[in-house]
Image (cartoon, helix red, strand yellow):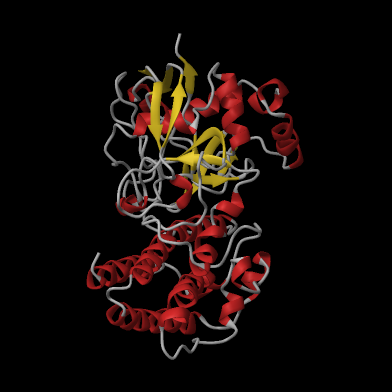
Amino acid sequence: MASSLIYAKYASIRARTLQLIEPLSEEDCCVKSIMPEMSPVKWHLGHIAWFFETFVLQHYEKPFKPFHPAFHTMFSSYNKSGQTHPDPLRGLFTRPSLSVVRDYCRTVDERMAQVLNYHADDKMVNTLTILGMNHERQHQELMLTDIKHLLSQNPLNPCFIVAQDPAPTAPRYPLASALPPLEWCHFEGGLVEIGYKGEEFSYDNESPRHKQYLLPYQLASRLVTNGEYLEFMKAGGYHNPSFWFTEGWDWIKAHRREHPLYWRDNNGSWQEFSLCGLALLDPTLPVIHISLYEAEAYARWSDARLPTEAEWEHAASQQKIEGCFAENNRFHPSAVIVTSKSEPAQLYGDAWEWTQSSYSRYPGYNPAKPNDHEPMSIVWDEAVGEYNSRSMVNQYVLRGGSCITPQKWIRASFRNFLPASTSWYFTGIRLARDAT
């Protein structure tokens, strides 16, 4: 890709990042919620600029001068790139101000334009810049997850955006009858190939493409809905240890978990907090903010299971990448309109789908190696290895993207990964079962 085209895409992604934070006040951007994994929006902005300054400008700008020497520590989250600031303390940064961090971003933008122009034919510069753009798209999603959790702690139940669809003023359970019934889509399986195939950008954890043997299997025709999950709750799902992993049972007891994150019981009438504020729970929408423990328990209660990541990718590779993504500016899942037994709906967008697959390396995996198979550089290893190869422990794979995921960030081979207890992400449930 020509450097001019790369910078045009860079500028477009940066414009989207800034557009996402427009509804927020400076106070919104400077604090974080109580959850340790969360970060303030101001930190995300600084971290995005830090990535380009550290992995591109520091090595290709002559002479290189950092915007501020302390920013290398303040906005780093990569252990191999030097000293980092503890994650839970990021919300204590009253300084630099948001305006200074925005100046940091603008300055990095100008310097990136110059470097890309001067090193127009340098493959590694272009490759690292494309990596940084994908990293920024990831943080666009993380900003929305963190904003949601932050606003949910506020008794005012503030809105991040005004709902495009009017919030229901009365229970909508009668509309649940219009929801397409959950059916089962059959796949023969056999010897299939999974993993990235192509010449565009992909992360190293998506490669190499390889063969796996799948027994015949079935996937649910749509995602599990709020109404269906509520039936699991009414049936005592959170009080029956037979549905739960031992670790999951210990987790719900330790956290007194009896319903999905962001659900609130208002005298028997369930409400859900979203980026549009607080509204009555819509039973037709996909259930989200579900941990792997909860997804697994629901699947067992349903006499089903979660899909493997190979099953999911085999099914998804036959479909177009379309659905409810961040570009819709809805930032909440949509109800499915129609389903069929031949093709699962909602494989892309709406909610990240838990799989039963542990996050691990593919056969023949070569960590942190550029797609063009050039020799791995120290810079590339620091930029990619921290994110992928050194995270391959105690995590599970999720697939498909969500309603806050940039659509252009997703492909059939894309592997997200999270600890089993994670529910602050926009995670949902796709059921699977062995074909009989």
Q: Total marks drawn?
A: 0
Instruction: Using the image as rendered, state which of residue 144 and residue 263 is in the foreground.
Output: 144
Instruction: Using the image as rendered, state which of residue 331 and residue 243 is in the foreground.
Output: 243
User: Which residue shows up at 37% across the image and 72% down it?
Assistant: 125
Percent across and percent down for residue 369 are: 46, 56
Q: Quadrant of residue 124?
A: bottom left
Work out whether 33 lies above or below 433: below
User: Which residue shows up at 29% across the image and 82% down it?
Assistant: 118
Percent across and percent down for residue 151 are: 53, 59
Residue lying at the far front of the rendered structure: 375
Work out whether 99 lies above or below 342: below
The C terminus - image quarter:
top left
Q: Quadrant of residue 38?
A: bottom right
Percent across and percent down for residue 298 are: 57, 26
Work out whether 52 lies above or below 194: below
The N terminus - image quarter:
bottom left
Left or right relative to 155: residue 316:
left
Percent across and percent down for residue 311 are: 44, 28
Instruction: Using the image as rendered, state which of residue 377 and residue 110 is in the foreground.
Output: 377
Q: Is residue 314 visible?
A: yes
Q: Is residue 28 visible?
A: no
